[in-house]
Amino acid sequence: MSVANADISPTMLESSTVRDIPALDIDKCSPADRAQWVTNPPEPPGIWRDLLNSLRDTMFPNPTKLFSPKRNTRIALLGSLLQAVFPILSWGRSYNLAMFKHDIFAGLTLASLCIPQSIGYANLAKLDPQYGLYTSIVPPLVYAVLGTSREIAIGPVAIVSLLLPSLIGKIQDPAADPLAYRNLIFTTTFFAGIFQAAFGFLRLGFLVDFLSHAAIVGFMGGAAIVIGLQQLKGLLGLTHFTNKTDIISVMEAVFGSFRHENTRWNPLNFIIGCSFLSFILITRLLGKKYKKLFGLAVIAPLLSVILSTLLVFLTRADQHGVKIVKRVPAGLNPISARHLQFHSPQISQITTASLIVAVIALTEAIAVGRSFASMKGYTIDGNREMVALGCMNLAGSLTSCYTATGSFSRTAVNFTAGCQTAVSNIVMAVTVMISLEVLTKLLYFTPNAILASIILSALPGLIDFHQAYNIWKIDKLDFFACLGAFLGVLFLSVEFGLLLSIVISFAKIILISIKPGTEILGKLPGTDTFGDIHQYPMALNTPGVLILRVKSSLLCFANANFIKDRILRMISNQEDASGKRGIQFLVIDLSNLMNIDTSGIGSLEELQNGLGGSGVELTIANPKWEVIHKLRVANFVGKLKGKVFLSVGEAVDACVAAKLGAMI
């Protein structure tokens, strides 16, 4: 078998000890020779080598191309390094006018949706409107230089805009001291960027996976309802509203507004908000049904802002109880480095909140980026995306932005509008910059109710009943994680719902890990394959040989004794009618086992001793690299006396031969 064209990365080659291996005549290799391949592998890479390789793979995913002998000049090497760090330099070389035309149209379309949404999301985050617009300038520009996704639209999003006041509002009341609250938001964004960049550099993307798909579905659904309830303040024109996010507190505040004179709702706000919400939703439905109306659906939020602002200005509805945005400062992002609160007494709470925000933002951005990349037939590097997202939020925290990430709704618009590269983000950011410079005075009479309706119009896509039903059908434990997140966010708080879903997900993992199942294997007729006899009832048993496979990737302190006791019970139950034990050999297929610790090795030694007392010989087959290395260092391989084989088939053949030899 030729391996000349195998897909082996340079990191894989360099992380192993290269040895001169003589040419082998496969036909002359005996099972004993192949057993030697298993028991005498090269030294596996150490933890520091793995860490260095991870860092290099993050920054330079193609080192062979980067350090090719053909690139022997300093200029070429510098160019390759810059392309590895800044992807825009790589795809920018093939950029052309036709692509720019698509990107400028997509960027302008994106800006028409982004401007009203950004103002609304800033309101949701308990910040002044300009901070939402600021967040639509610097982060998209930084991402366009560092990011690998071509379609993702960067800016403020609903989930993060809800999460920030939920977490930081417990440290500082935004109504009591808006400036102090704003400074803590900037600080949270700074640390969130640090966490995101660190996850990418250290290749810790698996941390994001602690939020399972089921937990995200439940969390998004619950958060969407909470966000919708929060918009009742703007939709009803309420002056005072609860800072809590649970449904009970919000509904108490809403019903209380009907009873108390000083917080009474104004029907004009409700009429304006509902009218334009209906307009946005109707145009969206028409845009989906008729492609020619797609442009109308996209600019419907911006049209709503323009028309409602004109309506309030011409009728002076603000003098009749309609709440308006009022002054939005003109000008670009001011520097906010001096506002970061590194010496705050609540710094531990801020960093905890930053970690939660960082993980949620990463989860949404990477999910959005991968979804649309798959539609275009390319892949994005998750770890490099984390670095890009972290750097853009670091830059944002220094320029009066709050935490930005990828927006699903705006990315869908960007994709549908025909964007080709991240230049669409640049066009969008420049358009928002121009708007901040010359158009902010026109937003004075914009009603708060229209901002609430724009946010409400974006929420239906966050609630996915179809996915929840599929989760229920496929995995009931996953559904409980989904339900836990949904109910926790809805009735308790955003962070508690998130924590509850993670706890349920971890409980599932722990339950599976500490009590893994075992499979009895049999040989499938006409093949050399061994499969679970319950899955394949036609599988054939080998007399006197019990073949087991542990359904776990790790044999450790948490499950080692459980597995050992289960195997011993299975052996003791394998007796014939006369009371004689029918098993002389036990073959354990270790192909599923990726790693083992000292407790796992100890349990194997105890298993061997227990089997020896019963006259059963232990044999192992197909151990992985890390596993056989540790077994060899612990001298367990020597105790097996050569009963280590490359495959289950060879192990069974050896057991049958030994049985026949004992009978002769």
Image (spheres, rainbow, N blue to C red):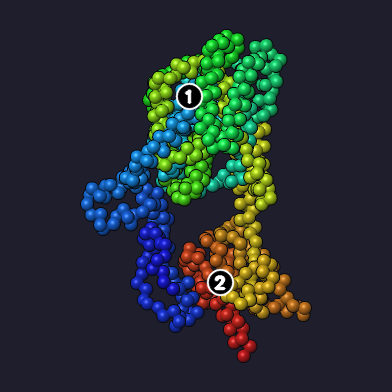
* Residue 103 screen position, x and y as percent: 41, 37
Considering the numbered disc 1 on the image, is that residue within a helix, a strand or a loop? helix
Q: In this view, does 244 lie above or below 444?
A: below
Q: Which disc is residue 182 wearing? A: 1
Assign the N terminus to one quadrant of the image. bottom left
Q: Counting residues from the N terminus, which is met first, the one under dot 1 or under dot 2?
A: 1
Could you tell me the amino acid type at mark 1? Arg
Coordinates of residue 619 in the picture (x, y in percent): 57, 74
Nearer to me, 72 or 301: 301
**Quarter occupied by the C terminus:** bottom right
Q: Can residue 420 be seen in this view?
A: yes
Which residue lies at the image location 58% right of the left edge and 21% below the top edge? Answer: 449
Q: Name the residue under label 2.
A: 620
| Residues packed near mark 1 inside 10 Å, few (<14), some (14 to 19) or many (20 plus) | many
Mark 2: which amino acid?
A: Ile
Horizontal side of residue 504 vs 368, given as left or right: right
Can residue 164 be spotted in the picture?
Answer: no
Please report the residue visible at 66 percent of the width from the left and 41 percent of the height from the top: 465
